[in-house]
Amino acid sequence: MKPVELDYRMTKQGFLEPIIEVSTCEQHIGKYGSIAIKYLKNECPHRYSILRAEETLMEIMYKVNEEAHQMMEVFQEKMLAKDPIPNPENFYDSYKHREMIRTMAEEIVLKEIVYRPR
């Protein structure tokens, strides 16, 4: 990892303050990207600051969101193949079964993709 070079300005109190510009990202980071940012900010604040200073935070979170959505689809398909809907004619049972599978898949995705330091 290369060192970050920053410009500084003098504050009224006589302290040097880094000049950091936050770039606006045109890509929406989505649900899982937002969760990953909150996790990184709370659990790895130093890494969060570095990624922000390098201006790579939003790009990485966009990729996290994309990867998480792809894995959600894969896990849900595999789980449905392994544990098919017992009564497809009953809407409530079908919904309940699919929601259970979605919740289990999301737990795996959160643990393996989203809650991982970058």
Image (cartoon, grey):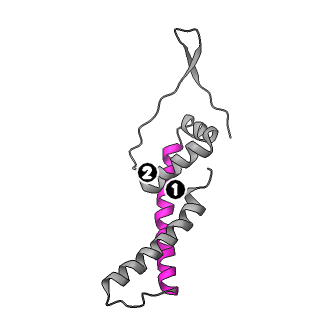
- Secondary structure mainly formed by the magenta segment: helix
Question: What numbered label is drawn on residue 29?
Answer: 2
Whether label 1 touches label 2, CB < 8 Å:
yes
Badge 1, how many Cα within 10 Å: few under 14, some, many 20+?
Answer: many
Q: In the rendered structure, find residue 82 and report the number of the disc placed on it.
A: none
The amino acid type, in three-letter code, at marker 2 is Ile
The numbered mark at residue 64 is 1
Q: Is residue 78 magenta?
A: yes
Q: Relative to 8, is 68 above or below?
A: below
User: Is disc 2 placed on a helix, strand or loop?
Assistant: loop
How far across and how far down the image is residue 20, in percent? 51, 27
Q: Nearer the viewer, residue 13 or 60?
A: 13
Residue in the image at 37% along x and 83% along y: 94
Q: Quadrant of residue 16?
A: top right
Q: Position of residue 38 (x, y in %)?
A: 52, 46
Magenta range:
56-82
Residue 46: percent from left, percent from top: 63, 38
Residue 46 versus residue 73 in the image, above or below: above
> What crowding class fits label 2: few (fewer than 14 Cα within 10 Å), some (14-19), or many (20 or more)?
many
Residue at (46% x, 87% y) in the render: 84
Real-space Cα distance between discs 1 and 2? 8 Å
State the quadrant of the N terminus: top right
Q: Is residue 29 above or below residue 22?
A: below
